[in-house]
Image: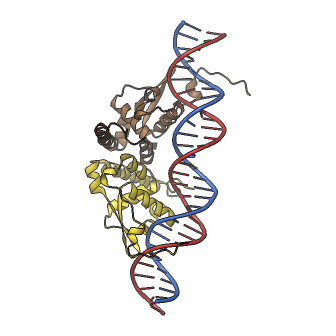
Chain colours: A brown, B yellow, C red, D blue
Amino acid sequence: MEPKVKTCYPEQVRPLIHPSIDDVTLEGILHALADPVRAAIYAQLAASDGAATCSTFVNVIDREIPKSTLSQHFRALREAGLVRSERNGVEMRNKTRCREIEQRFPGLIPAIMKAYMVESGEKARAAKRKPAKKTRAA
Amino acid sequence: MEPKVKTCYPEQVRPLIHPSIDDVTLEGILHALADPVRAAIYAQLAASDGAATCSTFVNVIDREIPKSTLSQHFRALREAGLVRSERNGVEMRNKTRCREIEQRFPGLIPAIMKAYMVESGEKARAAKRKPAKKTRAA
DNA sequence: TCCGTAGTTCGTAAGTTATGAACTATGGAA
DNA sequence: TTCCATAGTTCATAACTTACGAACTACGGA
């Protein structure tokens, strides 16, 4: 019930946490990308690195993802060191930190993304063959 | 409370589940290797692929891992398609399926293992610098 | 000042994981 | 044979993690 000061520097109030590249761990990266939604977000972000906003991804992976869930996924990617987010007015700009990660773990992200493409190619082909089912759900 | 038939073919009773290589997923692999204990087991198994038993790994990662936990970790690695286990008398022989995975996701496992080595190199160096603390635990 | 948009936080329900205790299977010794 | 030790598995449960709706904050116009 405190009067609550309204500051002019929101970044200081709710700072976005970005680990330094030296604190980025393999465990964190694998865990973050082991989630299919986050992998899809990351892949799409990497493919079109013009700094996309969060709400761009409401429909990755062919189902609607609630705002709050998306927000958590972005936090996970950010705190794993995979993306860098910057507030820009009312929205957020997200970019991959692939350059930095490439220096720390050379070849890791490209290999994972390549595997991701292999798999999504397979899925697309399977979906074309019998278009009734979509990948798994009834 | 049934009399319970004792069969001569235990493999048929409690079969070990190994996915076919086509059912191995990127998600499964990343999830399995995102756990530090499993990553250590896999790395050690990959380095010395002479088919190690489970109990060899009671002390990976500088703390004792309970048998039941180890058993679950091996199951996770097996069901992710990362290792193949064969019963051999009273024990189990575990080998990596790296050859197969390399065909399906070329470069993936080598890149992860390389990153793993980068990180464990760092940890070893840090531990040498101040030998009091061991990597994190009190 | 009010409104709409973009995201975050919180509480909770659902799912996952770790581990001790009890169990199964196997190979050898008595 | 029967008994024992060894190697792993299964089960129950406590601890942790995750997903998502509701309520909230922040910003930029009208």
Q: Is residue B116 above or below residue A85?
A: below
Q: What residue do we see at 52% from left, 20% from top?
A: A90
Q: How many numbered discs?
A: 0
Q: What residue do we see at 54% from left, 32% from top?
A: A68
Q: What residue do we see at 49% from left, 74% from top?
A: B4
Q: Quadrant of residue A2?
A: top right
Foreground of the two, A75 or A20 = A75
Foreground of the two, B63 or C24 = C24
Q: Is residue A3 above or below residue A102?
A: above
Q: Position of residue A54 (x, y in %)?
A: 46, 28
Residue furthest left in the image: B103
User: In the visual, does A66 lie left or right of B82?
Assistant: right
Q: Quadrant of the N terminus of chain A?
A: top right
Q: Position of residue B27 (x, y in %)?
A: 39, 46
Q: Position of residue C6 (x, y in %)?
A: 50, 23
User: In the visual, does A9 lie left or right of B37?
Assistant: right
Foreground of the two, B136 or B132 = B136
User: In the visual, does A11 lie left or right of B56?
Assistant: right
Q: Quadrant of residue D24?
A: top right
Q: Position of residue B134 (x, y in %)?
A: 51, 57
Using the rendered image of the protein, determine whether residue B64 is visible from the camera's viewpoint. no
Using the rendered image of the protein, determine whether residue A86 is visible from the camera's viewpoint. yes
Foreground of the two, A24 or A75 = A75
